[in-house]
């Protein structure tokens, strides 16, 4: 008797499980909730933030259509008298307020020696009067004054000057890249010893100059002219000011591949192999002045492009195409090649009956030559069929880790409702931390308030 009473309960349990199983199958099938869509990369120009050409910031006309500007600041301009740091001159000369309003970013280099046509100094008069132990030069590079970088007072005042500059820059993220200058001609960490200019200081002193930057700049990415041991240990980027010169660039890249050493007034500076440095830190620089820009963009274009690809460059400036040249196809092609180019190659949705959620999986790729070196927030947005925002969620993605040739998958979950069953849209928004700038994917899709629409689901009829 007891056995008979259990049979209906067992039947009910079996039926319930069967119904649940059918629902798990029928609901997604009936409404086509499980889908997979592949996307083609859009080949249209992107001109994304934090990459491209960096023309001289003082030239407003040349900077109008760039996302970066270059600031080459001499010590003489920054500190005309001891402890007087001329923020007003810096902001006025380089139009900083204007560029900030336009959401541009800067490449900054602090300079002590710029070879020119006339005899001159690029350090303040008061510093020269206090030290005066450098040497004037007249070489193939030009004319100028090479300070004694080992002088203790020079070192002390340099540290204070860079600290003050960093404190100003750290107020926001306008200055995105700092090229470690200070030492050598053009701040390139070498001197023309072949024509009698005193050599670079001992390696230990050079370390102190690096620390002046790394200890104080907090928001910007730091780059060195050569792959010295400091760049390797500090995970710094590198910059090449001879882009377009095959011979000079090959030597630079050989140092990066094989290492070596550079003679100084004391212990040599060691080059450390850093072939994959661009995966973690940026590569910048500018075009060489050895050849006319027209030649670099025509007869030497293919060779120039190969140098940019091989070194995984993110920006070029201040020596870059200007005037009518910057609007030409060659200059545009080079600008498009610089930096990142993100897109989503695949999006799939999978309905989970038990959780009543829709899993959204996206495959991210980068067809550029470098990543973005900041992990800007990425957000997925879901809209109903009328375009009203229903739901948003952070995407667990580090853009800096999406390297060229690499696929990265992310998964998000959408709480599923009857409203979504009628139809929905999925979009992605990538914004700067202050939400003033947007990074768009190399994909077709309507842009709606900074959100790029990717996918539309419509309920199956009948």
Image: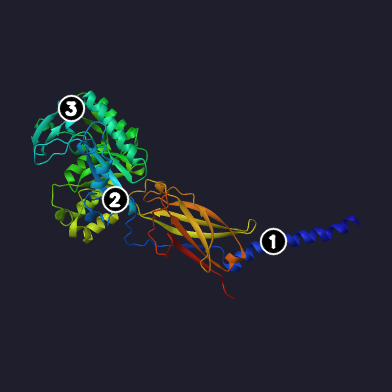
Q: In the image, residue 272 lies at what x, y percent?
A: 29, 33
Kindly report which numbered mark, 1 or 2, lies closer to the viewer in this rendering: 2
Q: Position of residue 324 (x, y in %)?
A: 18, 60
Applied colour scheme: rainbow
Mark 3 or mark 2: name the one nearer the start of the chain.
2
Classify residue 160 as left or right of residue 296: right
Vertical comparison of 30 with 63: above or below: below
Mark 2, residues whose alpha carbon is within 10 Å: few (<14), some, or many (≥20)? many
Res 68 label: 2
Chain-order first, disc 3 or disc 1 = 1
Residue 76 at x, y = what percent?
A: 20, 36
At x 15%, y 56%, the residue is 294
Quadrant of the image occupied by residue 206: top left
- All told, the count of numbered labels is 3
Eyeballing the image, is 72 above or below 47?
above
Q: Which mark is residue 335?
A: none
Name the residue that disc number 1 marks. Answer: 20
The answer to whether marks 3 and 1 mark residues whose Cβ atoms lie closer than 8 Å is no
Q: Is residue 407 left or right of residue 385?
A: left
The answer, for residue 456, to whether it is visible in the render is: yes
Q: Which mark is residue 148?
A: 3
Q: Please, what secondary structure does the residue beneath circle 1 have?
A: helix
**Circle 3 SS class:** loop
Residue 72 horizontal/vertical position (percent) = 23, 43
Taking depth in this image into account, of 277 and 317 the one nearest to the observer is 317
Is residue 259 toward the left or the right of residue 363 in the image? left
Mark 1 near mark 2, Cβ–Cβ under 8 Å? Answer: no
Q: Reading the chain from its start, which is encountered first: label 1 or label 2?
A: 1
The residue tagged with tag 2: helix, strand or loop? strand
């Amino acid at each position: 008797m007891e056995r008979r009473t259990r049979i209906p309960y067992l039947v009910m349990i079996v039926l319930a499980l069967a119904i649940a199983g059918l629902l798990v199958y029928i609901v997604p099938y009936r409404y086509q909730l499980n889908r997979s869509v592949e996307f083609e990369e859009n080949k249209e120009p992107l001109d994304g933030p934090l990459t491209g050409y960096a023309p001289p910031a003082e030239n407003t006309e040349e900077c109008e259509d760039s996302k970066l500007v270059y600031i080459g600041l001499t010590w003489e301009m920054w500190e005309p008298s001891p402890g007087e740091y001329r923020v007003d001159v810096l902001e006025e000369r380089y139009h900083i307020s204007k560029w900030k309003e336009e959401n541009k970013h800067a490449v900054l280099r602090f300079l002590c020696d710029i070879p020119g046509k006339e005899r001159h100094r690029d350090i303040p008069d008061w510093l020269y009067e206090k030290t005066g132990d450098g040497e004037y030069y007249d070489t193939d590079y030009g004319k100028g004054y090479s300070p004694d970088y080992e002088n203790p007072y020079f070192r002390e005042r340099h540290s204070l000057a860079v600290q003050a500059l960093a404190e100003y820059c750290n107020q926001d993220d306008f200055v995105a890249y700092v090229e470690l200058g200070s030492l050598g001609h053009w701040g390139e960490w070498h001197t023309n010893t072949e024509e009698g200019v005193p050599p670079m200081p001992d390696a230990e002193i050079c370390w102190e100059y690096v620390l002046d930057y790394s200890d104080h700049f907090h928001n910007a990415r730091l780059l060195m002219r050569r792959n010295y041991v400091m760049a390797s240990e500090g995970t710094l980027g590198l910059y090449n000011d001879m882009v377009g010169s095959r011979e000079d660039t090959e030597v630079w890249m050989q140092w990066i591949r094989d290492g070596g050493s550079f003679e100084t007034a004391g212990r040599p500076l060691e080059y450390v192999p850093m072939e994959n440095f661009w995966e973690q830190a940026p590569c910048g620089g500018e075009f060489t002045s050895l050849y006319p820009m027209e030649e670099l963009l025509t007869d030497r274009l293919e060779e120039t492009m190969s140098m940019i690809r091989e070194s995984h460059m993110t920006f070029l400036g201040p020596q870059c195409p200007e005037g009518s040249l910057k609007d030409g196809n060659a200059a545009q092609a080079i600008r498009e090649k610089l930096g990142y180019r993100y897109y989503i190659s695949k999006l799939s949705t999978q309905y989970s009956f038990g959780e009543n959620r829709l899993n959204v999986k996206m495959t991210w790729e980068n067809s550029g030559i470098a990543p973005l070196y900041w992990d800007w927030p990425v957000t997925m947005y879901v809209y109903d069929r009328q375009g009203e925002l229903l739901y948003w969620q952070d995407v667990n993605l580090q853009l800096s880790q999406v390297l060229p040739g690499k696929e990265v998958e992310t998964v998000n979950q959408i709480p599923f409702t009857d409203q979504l069953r009628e139809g929905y849209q999925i979009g992605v928004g990538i914004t700067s931390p202050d939400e003033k700038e947007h990074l768009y994917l190399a994909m077709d899709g309507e842009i709606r308030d900074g959100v790029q629409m990717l996918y539309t689901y419509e309920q199956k009829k009948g």
